[in-house]
Structure formats: structure tokens, C-alpha cells
Image: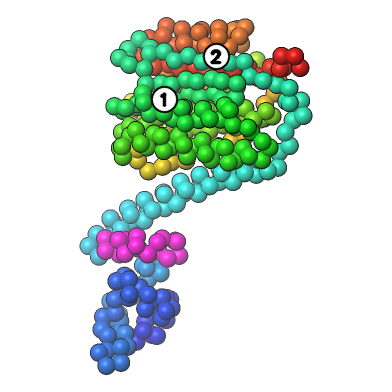
Amino acid sequence: MLTIGAFAKACRLSPKALRLYDELGLLPPARVDPDTGYRYYALAQLERARLVAWLRRLGMPLARIREVCELHAHDPAAAGREIRAHWARVEADTAARRDLAAFLVDHLTATPRKDTTMLELRYSAHSDRGRVRPANQDTAYAGARLLAVADGFGTAGGPASSAAVEALKFLETEEVAAGSVLNLLEDAVRGATEAVHDIAEGTEEVGTTLTALLWTGSRLALVHIGDSRAYLVRGGELFRITHDHTVVQSLLDEGRLTPEEATSHPQPALLLKALTGGAAAGPDLRLHDAHPGDRYLLCSDGLSAVVPDDRIRDLLTASPDPDQAVRSLIGAANDAGGPDNVSCVVADLVEAAGA
Ligand code: MG
């Protein structure tokens, strides 16, 4: 038997920490002297104590450490898997914070272009059932300030996509004062998340993607979750400005799949993130510099899954106005079999009339 002091020295935990872990049931001493209350530890407890110390250094919460220690007692491999799962969550959380930090830096340091003050959006939006699906679960919307596409899934996919877009529509009328963009986006994201959560009634099987652009008068703020996409045509070139939150995209990012293999993946639309009835996942937020003459496209995967990027670029650059562009893009998806609902929003950034 070791005294608490000797045991503390051996496992590199302080006596104070050992008393706390005793109270939490994480590491009870082998024996407590009934008269003095002194705690004594067995040598065999050192391994568990060292595991606790290592897990503390990982930043694992005490409640989870207890779970890992209990798993470790009968199945060390299961404890290993639990640590790996914990670390995957930490990394996902860090990645989300890194994106948020980049957004904030961008918001605070970038000076808006002066020549954007007299610009406005010309826009068109349409959503089509396609040729195969029995119903349309997509929602597309375009207004003077807000452009949005949402692709719902599950039994209440249609209501979910429409609720998400509906929750953003206050942005059309809300005054976008300089410096209030963050508040507005926060309200918008929370509103859309709650609206979908209510409809999905606690299941991750029901939800929606959401890709939206808000014109602030000088820049475009992007809100994006899922595998709907935003593209930009500038100088005759097509740029994709969103990143798909799909399993396939993450395998591509990690180099575990080649682009050729990705095109034949059996579940190309399996989503990593979406607005659902399950745990809240944060959308990507970004500020995007706008140039006069820019043409933006938001679309659901009903377009991008069947019409290749170079064809999308050709149709966008050949169309004289957003209406025509939307019609030809949706036509191209249906000509390619129309296997899914297809939604397109096209908007041009142009000199304001009378400016
Ligand atoms: Mg779809």
C-alpha cells in the first residue's frame, strides 16, 4: 500500500487531484483508514491513475475519462476507440472554430470596395421536380438582398427546406447597417436551425442543406451547409465558392479517393453536415468580395450531379439574363435524365438603375 503522497509522486497527479477523483468515483483509494481518514492506494492502481493523467493532458472531460477507464478495465481496444472518437470530435470542433476565426478576421480587417455602393442584384430563381422524383423537396428563393437554395431530405424534406429558407427571409427587409452583419447572420443561422429542428422532431433522418448569399450593399455574406453549391462566373471563368459537406469530398480532401474514383462512389450524396433534427452543426460563414459584372449561381445537387462544371459555365456565360440562365440550366439537368429535384438561383451584380 502506498500513502497518497507516495502514490501521487508515482503517478504524477497531485494529492488534491487524487482527492477530487476519489470524490468523483474515478479513482477510489484501495483503503481509507477509518480513524485518520488517510487514503491508501495499491500499486496495481498506478496504471489507471496514469491513464487518467494522460487523458487529462488530452483535455478530456472527467465524465468521459470515467467511461474510458471503465472500458479499459475489460476491453482496452474499446477504450482506444473511444479516445479516437473523442479526438475526432475535438478536431472537427477545432476546424469549425478555425473557419469562424478566418471569417471574423476577414470581417474586421477587409475594407469594402468603394465601387460597389451603386450595385444591385438582378435575379431569377426556379425549382423543378425533375423527371424521376415523385415530389419536389427543394426550395429556391431570390430577392433584392437574399439568394437561397435548400435541398430537403427525409419524410418531411420539403417542409424542412422551405422552413430553412423562410427563416432567412427577414434579411430582405432588415436594415444591414455596417457592423451588424455578424448579428444578422447569427440570427439567421439560429432561426433556420431551430425551424428545421422543429420540423424534424428529433431525427437526423429529416433535414435540409442550405446555401445562401446575403447582399450587404458592399459584399456578399455566404451561409453554407450540405452539398448544394454556390458558383461565381467572373471574367468568363467559373469558380465554385462552396465546399461540399459530403463523405466523398472529405475522402478527396484526405487524399483517400482520386477524383475519378469519386465520380463512381456508390453514395456520392452522403452528407457529413446538414440542418437536421439531430445535434446542431454550424454552417460555413464567409464574406465574399463582389465585383460589378459578377454572375452568381446557387444550385442543388440535382444540377451539379448530372451537369459537368464546364457545361454549367457555358450555359451561364451564353445566357443574356438570369431568367434565361435558370431555364437553360434546369433544362440541361432534365435532358440528363432529371434524376433529382433541381433548383437554380442566378443573380447578376449590376449598376443600379438611375445610378
Ligand atoms: Mg438533391
Q: CA distance from mark 2 to mark 1?
A: 17 Å
> Which residue is located at x 33 percent, y 34 percent?
200
- Taking the image as drawn, is residue 308 in sight? no
> Which residue is located at x 27 percent, y 93 percent?
35
Mark 2 Cα shell of 10 Å, populated few (<14), some (14-19), many (≥20): many
Q: How many marks?
A: 2
> Which residue is located at x 42 percent, y 65 percent?
56
Secondary structure, magenta segment, majority class: helix
Q: Secondary structure at mark 2?
A: strand
Sequence order check, earlier mark of 2 and 1? 2
Q: Which mark is residue 122?
A: none
How far from the left and from the top, in percent, is residue 119? 70, 21
Q: Secondary structure at mark 1?
A: helix
Quadrant of the rendered image containing residue 196? top left
| Residue 197 position (above or below residue 67) | above
- Magenta span includes 69: yes
The amino acid at mark 2 is Ser
Work out whether residue 129 or residue 200 is closer to the camera in this orientation and state it: 200
- Magenta span includes 280: no
The amino acid at mark 1 is Ser
Q: Which mark is residue 124?
A: 2
Mark 1 Cα shell of 10 Å, populated few (<14), some (14-19), many (≥20): many
Q: Which mark is residue 162?
A: 1
* Horizontal relation, residue 24 to residue 289: left or right: left
Magenta-tinted stretch: 55-71
